[in-house]
Amino acid sequence: MIAVGDGVRRMKRDERWIAYASRPFLGSIRLDGSKSLTNRALILAAIADGPSELIGALASDDTCALTNALAACDVSSSAEENSLRITPRVGGAPLRGGARVNLGDGGTPTRFMMALAALADAPIEIDGSRRMRERPVAEGAALLREVGADVAWLGKSDSLPLRVSPVQQQAKNIRVGKTASSQFVSALMLIAPKLPQGLALEFTEPLTSESYIDLTLVALEEWGVHPTVDRHEDGTLARIVIESSRIQGGVHHIEADASSAVYWWGAAAIIPGSQLIVEGLPSTSHQPDMAVREAIIRMGGVRHETDQGCGIAFSGDLHGIEVDASTWPDGAVLLAALAAAAHGVTRISGLHTLRVKESDRIAALENNIRLLGCPVRSGDDWIEIVGPCAGEFAVTIDPRNDHRIAMAFTVLGLRRSNLTIRDPSCVEKSYPRFWDDLRSLSEPTQ
């Protein structure tokens, strides 16, 4: 049995007990590349004009599922210590059709693969896990049909599994209304340079998670594609035009993952004496979850930056805030867990997409925070927590096979203690090294 403060102890194969962090988190940590940027880079590399080397690419359940799906369509890959080489199909259509691929729990990989299949030389069948079969894909199918592809449901209507047949007669101008996920729009943007006419997207309503569309625009620019972007007076997107063009292969660096960094920023904010930098993640990053750091600072964390990256330092007790997380809903899961350690009321709004993620994240947050003894209530797109939770009675957290729920409550357990995480391996979906990094940060410095 390890001493309290050594971070984490393995119990049963499917549970981990989280100990109180008796030592501050000091120094720096280097994370793998961004999951969002790696997924975008994989699609662009698959249709680039030559091989690409992705430096710092994330290897996780989601990204590996997408890499395997590409391999089934004749796009090869080879991994080295810190890079992934992607070699597109030689000649002809970007993808070989006729494949059947399964993207598991991956929402982004599934939706990106649906769009990519529209460029193949024959139909591709796409499936996923039981949970993924429950998640929305109908809007993506509708957009693909507007572009000129055909989508057929192979089981339940509007759900996986489905078959995408390639674009025949392409339409260039597409009007986009309200969507359940920005991933559908990003998927079309990524394949647009390889459509014969390019693509013009006109947005008739404000976009869901528009910050991720901005991230896709950044990715396209880095790969040599230069969209024309029109915005309304308030800065929201009005129209994006992407002309048919080359996608430049070569060496591309993947930034450290802000969505993984949030857990260590949160830990530094609640563990006394901590001062922690995430290396390779500049404060100017366009990743949407960078906003989590600013929210933690509003709660009382201290801004901490060096030439190597950006971080958080501990200053004392956190306090509740009211915040709109509509542009960074995934990061809001960590913020809700921190709220259970903060003094006062925290209200987080803009969370409607969390109902249809790997779990119903709002329900998972509410149920688990209530187990800890905090008053909590929620609505369709908001949650309100009154902290701090009192007591150190034993609590087992059920993350519902959701990586972000598991990691967020692990952070809270470092301050509260006597907390067990069920199904800890679910973190491999986005952050396979999470438990190793936690152990490393918890060990005494030499």
Image (cartoon, grey):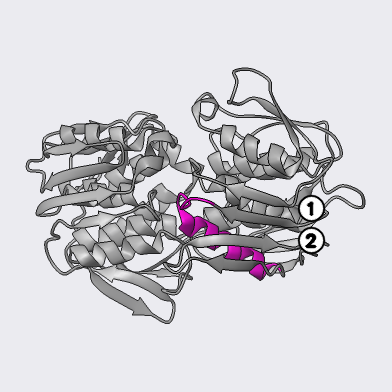
Question: What residue sits 48% from the left and 51% below the top?
Answer: 207
Residue 216 is a magenta residue = yes
Residue 314 is a magenta residue = no
Image position, residue 123 (x, y; %)? 80, 32
Tag 1 secondary structure: loop
Q: Which residue is mark 1?
A: 195
The answer to which image quadrant residue 47 occupies is: bottom right
Mark 2: which amino acid? Ser
Residue 407 vs residue 95: left or right?
A: left
* Label 2 crowd bin: few (<14), some (14–19), many (20+), radius 10 Å: some
Mark 1: which amino acid? Leu
The tag on residue 291 is none
The answer to which image quadrant residue 417 occupies is: top left
Question: What residue sits 30% from the left and 75% below the top?
Answer: 304
The tag on residue 244 is 2
Residue 18 vs residue 59: left or right?
A: left
Q: Which residues are magenta?
A: 204-223
Question: What residue sits 64% from the left and 45% below the top?
Answer: 112
**Quadrant in which the N terminus is drawn:** top left
